Amino acid sequence: MLPGIDLSADDLKVFIQEVDGLLELLDEDIIRLEQEATNEELLQEIFRAAHTLKGSSGMIGYQAMADLTHKMEDLLDRVRKGTLAVTPGLVDALLMSLDGLKELRDDLAAGQETSLDVAPIVAALQAAAEGDGPTEAASDAPSLDALVADPAIAARIEASTAAGVPLLRVHIELAPDTEWASVRSFQVLNELSARGELIISAPTMQDIEEERASHTLEALLATATATDDIEGAVGAVSDVASVTLSPWDGPREAAPAAPTPLADAKAASKPEARAADGGREGGPRVEALSQTVRIDVERLDALMNMVGELVIDRTRFAQVSRSLQSRYKEDEQVRILNETSLHISKVIDELQQSMMAVRMLPVGVLFSKFPRLVRDLARSMGKPVSFVVEGEGTEIDRSVIEEIKDPLVHLIRNAVDHGIESPEDRKAAGKPETATVRLAALHGQGQILITLTDDGQGIDATKIREAAINKGVVTAEAAARLSDQEAVELIFAPGFSTAKQTTEVSGRGVGMDIVRSKIEELSGSVEVSTRPGEGTTFLLRLPLTLATVRGLLVESGGTVYAIPLAYVQEILRMETDELHSVGGRPAMRRRDDAMSVLNLSDVLLGGERPDGSSEPSEYVIVVRTGESDADRPVAITVDALIDQQEIVVKSLSGYLGRARGIAGASILGDGQVALIVDVPSLMKAAQSAASAAQPLKFERPERMAS
Amino acid sequence: MMERVTDGERQLVVFDLAGESYGVEINAVREIIRMQEVTHVPDSPGYVEGVMNLRGSVIPVVDLRRRFGLAVTEATADSRVVVVDISGEGIGVIVDAVTEVLRISEASVSPTSTVITTEDSFYIEGIAKLDDRLLILLDIERALAEQVEELTAATRAMAA
């Protein structure tokens, strides 16, 4: 137990839980405060949280936390009373305090004395209270710990590690009275570059060249040079007050994303302490107290697979048991066997449900990472943005959550970077200067729907056409034939990027085509709708889980197929007089619309029916992949409907070739393998056939991953 | 207890296909099962019969007769699926019958090149002369390799 803290292990746990709840609340509220500076209720909530934290930490004698929250409370009280305005600087100071509180909490949970010096944070709060907030220029420079999160930087770090080159964290303090911070920083970086590979520095070389240096400089250097030599060389630069070298131990968790000069002061106050316990980051902390276990998703998948096998065996077991019972009605042992079989069935059902539940997470665990991303982006680009999140409680399979993070980050970056106009342009267009970006999730039709909406300039179909022609994505003739919606969809074409210039934010080599293919890999889809001048919405449709799918089992050409129910709009009985011929191709009238008609096994097998039958199909399944006008429904005819059930998705071996039109396989209750129909690729085949009046063929060069 | 295979010896799974006896290294074989229902997969290579359920896994199944360009016949009660391990993946191979597990001496094997040099012999490792018959030793990995183009190239390289 820490000195001065008088608490039993149980009480400590309760305290930590309370702190966690309040920190989570503050995390969201402080970001919101920046947008809703005048929201009194919100201010009250933040104030109360700080107040409660102060009281609780004071009671258990955790002085550092009590001091910090006391200062926060003072500051918030003044904001509450209206004597202090909410400024970005003030929010920065609050965020910095929050990061400090998180560190204090972690140290307490790990049962170790904190190395955090709260004085600089308290000073920052003080400064914010005096309206002497950090300057814009400095806060634009992200910290070293924020910069290393960049994939390009991370890759270089990995490369050095792999090559066995030691990585050093270099921390430089310049004399406080130097008037040449930029020049000296530049000199220091030159010295470092001469002695190894300078991976990244904070401030970056570019910041320094633009005179945005501060009195603290941090750098990450991959070098085999002796630390003494580096220290000597850097120390010889004029105005360098101190040089601290420590082995790189990864980014520091509590690092503020946008450090202010005050944050630098905080960092400066503790490099020694950091260096002394460099291994601390990986040490026992939060988990020690929580009742949760972290599990690799692969292990969950393996468990899920086994449950899937049990489900199949259960059906067989029940069948055998039933037939035994009808044969030996009076036998006591058979009766017991039957009862046991029923019980096992029930347990397996529950096991399957629980396994599914274990894999589900509220999408909020992902969404909660975005407000800070938007805030930092918005500030770095000088565009005021209000970020609204809805439906955080929507549950989705964790494997899906992991897969959609990058696509969402890309869409959000795009929205802020390209979607939203500069404040001046917005003003000129008669829009509020503060733009709104809305991220929402909801369940619908066995899918999860995620929308990202901005109220920016929208996507100009004409400009897209021009750009696509210039980049050779389409010919001028083809572009002229496209409707505006189709033209806008060109943003998803490979090799297309609308950015006139690649900015630091979105120029990361990830295009919209990657976003689309990533989502389609998950058996999902992306749609875009835009109104020039009013904004753009991206709609992502995703399966709730990748492990199972609700499927409609049908028979076509003697084979059983599963059609994911998410795509099924309605099921009709075939009436021969409804069949028409449009342009030589079968079509069906449905209300006021004509739909293409495909026979499932014909389109999959290219006309050959394994059972040689030519009987007209009995049933019509109307499928559709999306709601937009471009996604027209298609009628698929099948010979028989079998069942509708939850099926476990198995991927197909690459040995089977492309297997176009097939998304995977599943094992049915009787042990038979049913193929899962890849509806989007089937539809694409149908559409290209309809538009070009040519034999059905698949457009996609490769089979969709299952 | 399994006997140890000494140096200069090979242990083979022997199966029949269109009247010939073939041998595959026992280490390449995961298991041998009875014929099962096979689901045809559209747009897969012609020699792939489809997929089947192997205790909860879906594995591809190849009809070796089709693969070798032999007349395809209906499955009989003797038909078996030899599940082989190709780079960690299980692939089912349909054969007419599995007859025995055999131990042969390395000395009885003649390398292919001295026996036959046809275009398709790239997947034949050699011929083993037993007392009263010949056994074709299959390199099952090559016999099942996906890209036919690649194989032809490999054959040419061998011929050169």
Image (cartoon, helix red, strand yellow):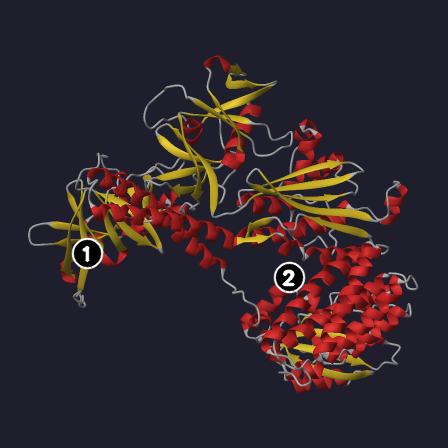
Quarter of image, res A250:
bottom right
Q: Residue furthest right?
A: A83
Q: Which residue is mark 1?
A: B12
- Decide which of A591, A706 is in the foreground and name it: A591
Please provide percent x and percent y for residue A14. 63, 70
Residue drawn at x 49%, y 58% as measured from the top left:
A297
| Amino acid, disc 2 | Ala
Compared to A583, does A542 lie above or below? below
Instruction: Give residue A24's position: percent from left, percent from top.
Output: 69, 62
Q: Quadrant of the N terminus of chain A?
A: bottom right
In the image, residue A223 above or below residue A390: below
Q: Say left or right for A522 vs A674.
A: right
Chain holding disc 2: A
Q: Are marks 2 and 1 in contact (CB under 8 Å)?
A: no
Q: Quadrant of residue A143?
A: bottom right
Which residue sits at x=39%, y=50%?
Answer: A348
Mark seen at residue A389: none
Residue nearest the observer in this picture, A131 or A6: A6
